[in-house]
Amino acid sequence: MTDPKTTWGAGEYALMAQAIEPVSIELVDVVAVSPGERVVDVATGTGNAALAAAARGASAIGVDFEPSLLGLARARAAAGGVEIELVEGEVEQLPIGDEEADVVLSAFGVMYASDHAAAARELVRVLAPAGRIALAAWIPGSVMPAMGATVAPYLPPLPSASAPPSRWGDPQSLSDLLAEAKAALHQSRGGRLDLRFQDADDAANFLIRTSGHLVSQVEPLTAEGRWGELREDLVDFVARHGEAGADGLVLHLDYLIAIAGRP
């Protein structure tokens, strides 16, 4: 694994990627990826959607700007005997030619683009005329966006041009974004992914370990005497949003599956 280039490479994001992998498989299923199709997985991370597409016989390319995550994806592909191409690149400027993809996928990836409009244009640019786009994004107000709002006061401010990532999880907002990029939202549906923990403390530990944005701030916030405060806020957040039971605590992560294409 190479050294991280961005905060996405800090911590143990691979554990979160493993937890959300079922959604990538759902994306591949919902657009019925077929053998021989050209598939581009945008913001592939550790390769979830690209690997799922390749398992169905597609020619898959995964693009991500974090080299350490691409290294993990390569290791997964090699271990599974699956052939995929992995390329370092930005979602706002994909290293893919015009109309080269029969299917464009992104599972909780493109939603974090710094320029949403540019990223949407790129999804459409690389798509073949009759191609399909399948996206998964967290729904506004659900656990993951709410967690982001909880820890935001402790983190460096986002670039002023950024929009909330969960914009991609709202059908109307996503439809408007895609329309500006000369695409159309054909259908959408909600889904839920459950993460199970022993208790709120266990859940908070997992969320910290798997978030490079938080891991990268341990040292500076500790120096400021604020790290303990952040962790307490996160434990309280999980306790309020989780469902406690005899077997532990469950976090329900609500997401949107969206299918789009050229008008």
Image (spheres, rainbow, N blue to C red):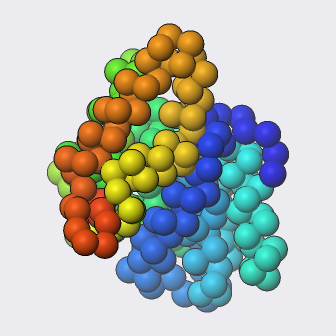
Relative to the observer, which residue lies in front, 93 or 22?
22
Q: Is residue 123 above or below residue 60?
A: above
Q: How many marks?
A: 0
Relative to the observer, which residue lies in front, 3 or 99?
3
Q: Residue at x 56, y 13 (%)?
A: 223
- Asked if residue 163 lies left or right of residue 202, the reply is left
Q: Residue at x 75, y 80 (%)?
A: 80
- Asked if residue 184 lies left or right of residue 99, the reply is left
Q: Residue at x 59, y 29 (%)?
A: 216
Residue 229, image quadrant: top left
Instruction: Please state, as top left, top right, bottom left or bottom right, where the C terminus lies in the image.
Output: bottom left
Q: Is residue 153 above or below residue 120?
A: above
Q: Is residue 228 visible?
A: yes
Residue 146, image quadrant: top left
- Asked if residue 60 lies left or right of residue 129, the reply is right
Q: Residue at x 69, y 52 (%)?
A: 69
Q: Position of residue 67 (x, y in %)?
A: 74, 46
Q: Is residue 162 visible?
A: no
Relative to the observer, which residue lies in front, 55 or 16?
16
- Asked if residue 140 lies left or right of residue 99, the reply is left
- Furthest toward the front, the residue is 246
- Furthest toward the top, the residue is 224
Q: Position of residue 28 (x, y in %)?
A: 48, 77
Q: Position of residue 217 (x, y in %)?
A: 55, 25
Residue 84, image quadrant: bottom right
